Image (tube, rainbow, N blue to C red):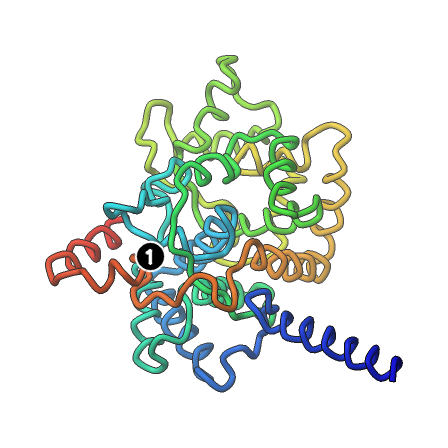
């Protein structure tokens, strides 16, 4: 009898802990929408493909949008939230203001997904899917995106200002920023490789060209020929909004050129070149490896993107599935037509 009682008690423990595994801590799964929204991948892919035909730069912008979301209180689509009486938007944080792009594209995707599968797919998952599809369309790596994220109900402008790596970060500051998110040095180098496509405004690196560290001289780690090319694009005292390609050779393709550029002292941002030009850095060997082995760089990029996409995710009963990506559901229900038009104008202007 005693052994039977013990067995029953053990079975109860198993049942209790088995139930816990199905709670809000459930793991993300690439097949999460297999039954509830089986066409979600193709819907996202079609919108991103059509937009990128007119604006190839958008592929890099969507990849960056996912990155800037995950580094601020996790991958919860908080970057998409507009200002309201209760939300201080991350879109106006210094690293994002007049810089992030693609908010209107995410809204376009959300509209199409809602038409097919109402109240099912989160904006956070749409960001993750759009990032992977952008990589694939840019001839970069592809991976099975773990899904099942839910959307947050808050934004954190302070964290956006503090957590996102800056263009003039030293290697130590980069390592800390990535380490704080649970990402290691290999992840740092691999994810930085996304700077092989897209553009950056002159304001982010012009000091390197004329007055590096207030010396009145250019950054000594810049190749002299590349320096002259950049000075033509970004004249001293010129408009800071002018754009320069991260990669001067294949600006719309995600390839290993980022790493070969670093070895040639042609990293556009100081934070890029730090990976190779910091004396004795352990990142140098990784850059060398990735520059000569695209398969290795792609493999590490895929793994790092999946790892990043798991930062601080909300699952189960936490968070919500937003009906409109720019507002939490309570606000969405309160919006009148004038507010909707205003929000679309705000999104489109960025």
Residue name at image x 40 percent, y 76 percent: 120
> Measured from the top left, where is residue 269 in percent x and y?
52, 35
How many callouts does the rendering have? Answer: 1
Q: Is residue 14 above or below residue 208?
A: below
Disc 1 designates what residue?
Answer: 103
> Measured from the top left, where is residue 151 in percent x and y?
42, 61
As rendered, which of 160 and 345 lies closer to the eye?
160
Q: Is residue 307 above or below residue 214?
A: below
SS for callout 1: helix
> Measured from the top left, where is residue 207 in percent x and y?
46, 24
From the viewer's perspective, tell me whether residue 291 is left or right of residue 258: right
> Measured from the top left, where is residue 250 in percent x and y?
52, 54
Residue 90 occupies quadrant: top left
Residue name at image x 33 percent, y 45 percent: 89
The answer to whether residue 171 is visible is yes
Residue name at image x 59 percent, y 55 percent: 308
Q: Find the residue positioned furthest to the top.
A: 215
Quarter of the image containing the N terminus? bottom right
């Amino acid at each position: 009898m005693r052994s039977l009682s013990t067995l029953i008690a053990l079975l109860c423990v198993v049942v209790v802990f088995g139930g816990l595994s199905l709670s809000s801590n459930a793991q993300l799964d690439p097949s999460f929408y297999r039954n509830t929204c089986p066409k979600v991948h193709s819907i996202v892919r079609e919108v991103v493909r059509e937009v990128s035909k007119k604006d190839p730069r958008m592929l890099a912008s969507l990849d960056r949008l996912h990155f800037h979301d995950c580094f601020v209180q996790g991958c919860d689509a908080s970057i998409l939230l507009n200002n309201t009486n209760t939300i201080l938007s991350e879109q106006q944080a210094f690293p994002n203001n007049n810089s992030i792009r693609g908010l209107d594209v995410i809204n376009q995707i959300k509209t199409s997904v809602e038409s097919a599968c109402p109240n099912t797919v989160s904006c956070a998952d749409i960001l993750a899917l759009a990032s992977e599809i952008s990589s694939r369309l840019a001839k970069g790596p592809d991976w099975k995106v773990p899904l099942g994220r839910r959307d947050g109900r808050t934004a954190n402008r302070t964290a956006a200002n503090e957590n996102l790596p800056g263009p003039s970060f030293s290697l130590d500051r980069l390592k800390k920023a990535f380490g704080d998110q649970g990402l290691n040095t290999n992840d740092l180098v691999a994810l930085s490789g996304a700077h092989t496509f897209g553009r950056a405004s002159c304001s982010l690196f012009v000091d390197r060209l004329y007055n590096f560290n207030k010396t009145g001289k250019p950054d000594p780690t810049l190749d002299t020929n590349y320096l002259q090319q950049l000075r033509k694009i970004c004249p001293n005292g010129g408009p800071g909004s002018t754009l320069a390609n991260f990669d001067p050779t294949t600006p719309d393709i995600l390839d290993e050129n980022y790493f070969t550029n670093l070895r040639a002292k042609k990293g556009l941002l100081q934070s890029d070149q730090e990976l190779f030009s910091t004396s004795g850095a352990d990142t140098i060997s990784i850059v060398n490896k990735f520059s000569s082995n695209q398969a290795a760089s792609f493999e590490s990029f895929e793994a790092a993107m999946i790892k990043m996409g798991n930062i601080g995710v909300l699952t189960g009963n936490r968070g919500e599935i937003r009906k409109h990506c720019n507002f939490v559901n309570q606000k969405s229900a309160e919006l009148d037509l004038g507010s909707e038009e205003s929000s679309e104008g705000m999104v489109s202007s960025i």
